[in-house]
Structure formats: C-alpha cells, structure tokens
Image (cartoon, grey):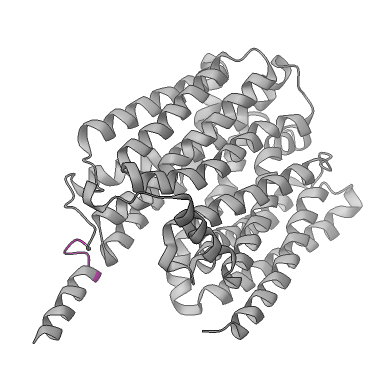
Amino acid sequence: MQNKATNSVDDLSEHGQIPSSKAVEPNLAFGEFIVLMALLMSLVALSIDGILPALKILGPEMGETAPQQLQKVITFLFAGLAIGQMIYGPISDQIGRKKSIYIGLTLFFVGSVISWASVSFDQLLLGRFLQGLGAAGPRIVLIALVRDLYAGRTMARVMSFVMGVFIFVPVIAPIMGQTVAQLAGWRSIFFCFMILCVISGLWLMVRQKETLLPSKRRKLTPSTIWQGIKIVLTTPSCVGYMIATGIVMGPFLLYLSTSQDLFQNTYHVGDLFPYFFAALALSIGVASFSNSKLVMRFGMRFLARTALSVMVGLTALALLVSAPNGFVPPLWLFMLLFSPLFFCMGLLFGNMNALAMEEVGHVAGMGSAVVGSVSTIIAMLLASLLGLFYDGTIITLAASFMCCGALNLVIIWITERLRSVAPA
C-alpha cells in the first residue's frame, strides 16, 4: 500500500502537478512567468546580436576599423560570460535566486553605462566584459529558479516555452539594433539595454517571489566546490563532450564576430545585413524546435555525429566551389550552404551539452557551471585565434567549421571508447 502511494506521488511529480521536494508554489500566472523568464534570459542574445549592425559605425568613431579588432566587441562579452557562469550557480544556492539575479543585472547595467559613455575602445571593451559578467547571472540562475517551481514534464514544458521565445531573439535583435542606431546613434543601443535591464529587474522584484527557501539553501565551502569540480573533471564523458562543445562553439563565435564585415564589406548588402543574419539564425531556431522530436527517435549521439558529419561535408563543399572565385561564393550560394550548416549547429547546441551532463547529474549545479564556463572559454580562445586569419572571405570560416567538426568526430569516438571501458 505504501509503495502504491509512493508511486502515485512520483507520477504526479513527473507530470508537474505537485512540487518536487525542494519546490515552492508558483505565484505568477503561467503566461506572465514565461514572458518574464524569456525577457531575463534574452539579455545575452540581445547584447551579442543587437550590437552587430553598429560595428561599422562605432569602429571608426573609436579609431578601430580592422575586423580583427572589432571582433573583440563580441569576444570580450563572452569572456565575462565564461567567468560568470562559474560564479552564479554556487552563489544562488547560498543567498537565493533573486539576489543572485540582482547582482547580475547590476553588473550588466554598469557595463551598459560604461559602454554607452565610453570615449575609447578599451573602455568599450571593459563595458562589454562587465555586460557578459552580469548577463551570466540571469542565464544560469533562471534554470535553477524554474527547477525550484516546477517538476517533471511541467518543467520541460516551461523551458520549452521560454526557449521558444529566446531562440528567436537573434532573429529580431540585429533588426532592432540597426533601427535604433539609424534613429539615435549606436550609443542608444546600450541605453536600450539599460532600459530592458531596469524593466526586467523591477518586474522580477515586484512580481516574482523568492523560490529557494532559507531552509533549502546550502553554505558552500572551498572543499565542497572542489569536490564537485573534481567529479566533473574525472568523468570521461563529461570532459570529452565539454571540450567538444567548446570546439564546435569556436567557429560559431567567429561567425558572430565577423558576420557584419562579411555581409556588409564583402557582399555589400548594406542595411539588409540584419535580414540575412536573421535568415541564418532562423535555421538554428527551427533546428532547436525540431530537436525535441528528432532526439526521441534517433538519440543524442546519433544526432550529434550526423550533424558534425554534415557540417564537415557542407563546409568542404563550400571551400571547393568557392576556390575558383577567391573563396567568395555568390551570396545565394553562401546562404544555401550555410543555412543547413546552421541547422546542424542548432542540433548540436542542445545535444552536446546534454551529453556532457549525462553522467554528472548528481552534481548537476556544479556540473552545469563547469561545463558552461570551460566550453565558453575554449570557444572564446579558439575564436580569437581563428579571427587572426580572417581576410574577408569565407576560407577561414568554412575551414574552421570543417576542421573543428572533423576534430569533434574524433573526440566523440575517443570519449565513447573511454565511456564504454569506464568502471560502473
């Protein structure tokens, strides 16, 4: 009789009808909660994609016109993001979710002010670093906040709705950024970031209750943090897929930091740049939605290997057909080849991270922090190195995707071999 009752409770928790052991009751209407979470999580994507159309304007004003220098406007934000991901998870377990998000929003606001008021390129980069350090707060803590409130399938449903809104931010952010820059100058983009930061922070403060009860908080010590890190770094599958995630993100970060120069200076699309950027971003969004069904049918490992194989083939084809034209294929051909490439990226983002976390679920908080931080650092360093070879053509971009994709296939093969022989 007791087992039957326990099973019933487990079933209810799986369907999200009762809170899990560490959950509290939601206090917001479902729709309002989704919009608030999506707004807070979107700060990262807005900070990256919203500034891209303004690079051609702010560069000359700051005395920097070389593409390799302008790439730093993106990579410095990722540097802050990489460090922040390691910090906020443990902090939120100790002081609560809302206070941790407030810290992140404050840093993001300060970074936006510095970027807005900057009179030198170095000041702008400092502001971008602080923006990334701050934006990491909502990005990391919100997942824990949702987990506090919902369980089982309801949590999956909530995250699907939130990510559904979040995914399409890269589609509209460049268009919004270009419109604001044309109407009021590039500095106004950072002013808009400040407004969004204040609105989302006040909304969170007034409407959302703290979700981590004082009785559920943990005081973290250096020894407990080190134990969590040690478990993550001694799990072969986690390390392998963490490295692979960083490597596959590297060429994508290179694309983000060079896309404005490629479209506007190589293909001369002018003010149509945000729309071409949005078209490729849409491929990632479609893949993310499709992945929920594909992964149930084919599995994460098959999808990851297939996506990497297709990536290698597409970029090899791009290099082959563009070589006679100085590695600058016609714009229609570039879009034709890179749209399915970015669909593959959309499949990889979720599956690679899930594979990295698969065997460290018992230290999920620290595991997520380490995987996110290390993979972002790898991507940032790799993109910075690859960016030195960017010459306005697609050769560096395509070769990076091809070589990193091939390298990841080898890493995955080695990782799976180590996983199969690891002691249970």
Q: State which quadrant residue 91 falls in.
A: top left
Identify which residue, 18 or 369, lies in the foreground: 369
Furthest-left residue in this view:
1
Toward the viewer: 64 or 410?
Answer: 410
Instruction: Give the residue drawn at x 62%, y 85%.
Output: 421
Q: In the image, is residue 290 part of the stretch drawn in magenta?
A: no
Residue 83 is situated, as x and y percent measured from the top left of the image, at 56, 42
Residue 392: percent from the left, percent from the top? Answer: 81, 39
Residue range in magenta is 14-19
Q: Which SS type dominates the magenta stretch?
A: loop
Residue at x-position 49% and y-position 30%: 176
Residue 106, image x and y in percent?
42, 27
**Magenta stretch: residue 16 in it?**
yes
Residue 252 in view: no
Q: How many marks?
A: 0
Q: Is residue 153 left or right of residue 59?
A: left
